[in-house]
Image (spheres, grey):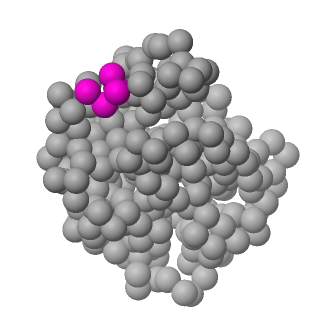
Amino acid sequence: MPNRLQHPSLFLAWSEAPWDAAVTGYPVWQISHVSLSGPDADAAMVAFEATRDRAGVGLVSCRLQHDRLRESMFFESHGFRFIEMVYQPELALAGTVLVEDSQILPVRPAREADLPALLDIAGTAFHNERFHMDPRLGDQLSRARYQNWVRTSLDHPSQRPLVMTEGEAPVAFFVTEILPDKFCYWHLNAVAPAFQGQGYGLRAWRSMILYAASAGLQGVRTSIAARNERVLNLYARLGFRFHAPQMTFHWIRETTS
């Protein structure tokens, strides 16, 4: 259940991120909705900040549509910092014809025995993601975040880690979730370092599209930082459609950085 601040000049909704708190060691919040509607928004924000400080929150994140400059300036005036621009590529699978060929990799659910290899991959990937890009958080914390995400996905009620192999070696993994509209959401995806630069990225992504289509799903969605140009080009090559980007902001308590 999200928390709310309702004021004539400001509406905020936010929720806790316990998966991140497990890694950071302090509470983490995510703002999911903001509406500025009056001249007293700054005064109203004080109530949110007091609640945040009483809870000992060390990190607050927020995403805004790219054209919400008034809101972005508002958050920056309250200590938030711009971290990244994010796209959310989407591919509808209706009418998609994919032929399984020798380039398609076998896809299967990840097993406990895969975990050491998947954690190694997660520890070297995601350098373009927001935790890595925020210099106040540090690489060690960032690696721990994504490794913990992979680890907990094995027992997650709705997320499912899938792995692709070449022989016995894990080539790539995807952490996925089936959404109510029958789209598959790709939360995390990465190629093992030993297989990078050899065309395995295209093979893995094509294999996952075929896997979703074979399961009767309506499409695929994901998110990607705008700075990750190589994978952005891969999505474009595969026919994904790009919605308008979003801006990500972080507020971090000074004593936690």
Is 223 on the left or on the right of 174, as rendered? Answer: right
**Number of callouts in the render?**
0
In terms of image quadrants, where is residue 182?
Answer: top right
Residue under the image location 41 percent in, 17 percent down: 5
Does the image show residue 203? no
Q: Which image quarter holds the N terminus?
A: top left
Residue 74 to residue 44: above or below:
below
Image location of residue 226, percent across then percent down: 61, 64
From the viewer's side, name the closer residue of 18 and 199.
18
From the viewer's side, name the closer residue of 257 and 23.
257
Residue under the image location 33 percent in, 67 percent down: 135
Residue 83 to residue 91: above or below:
below
Residue 114 to residue 162: above or below:
below
Q: Which image quarter holds the C terminus?
A: bottom left
Dominant secondary structure of the residues highlighted in magenta in the image: helix
Does the image show residue 233? yes
Image location of residue 255, percent across then percent down: 16, 53
Which residue lies most toward the right here? Answer: 95
Residue under the image location 75 percent in, 65 percent down: 236
From the viewer's side, name the closer residue of 220 and 111.
220
Residue under the image location 17 percent in, 35 percent down: 56
The span picked out in magenta is 46-50
Image location of residue 129, percent across then percent down: 45, 62
Image location of residue 61, percent across then percent down: 40, 43
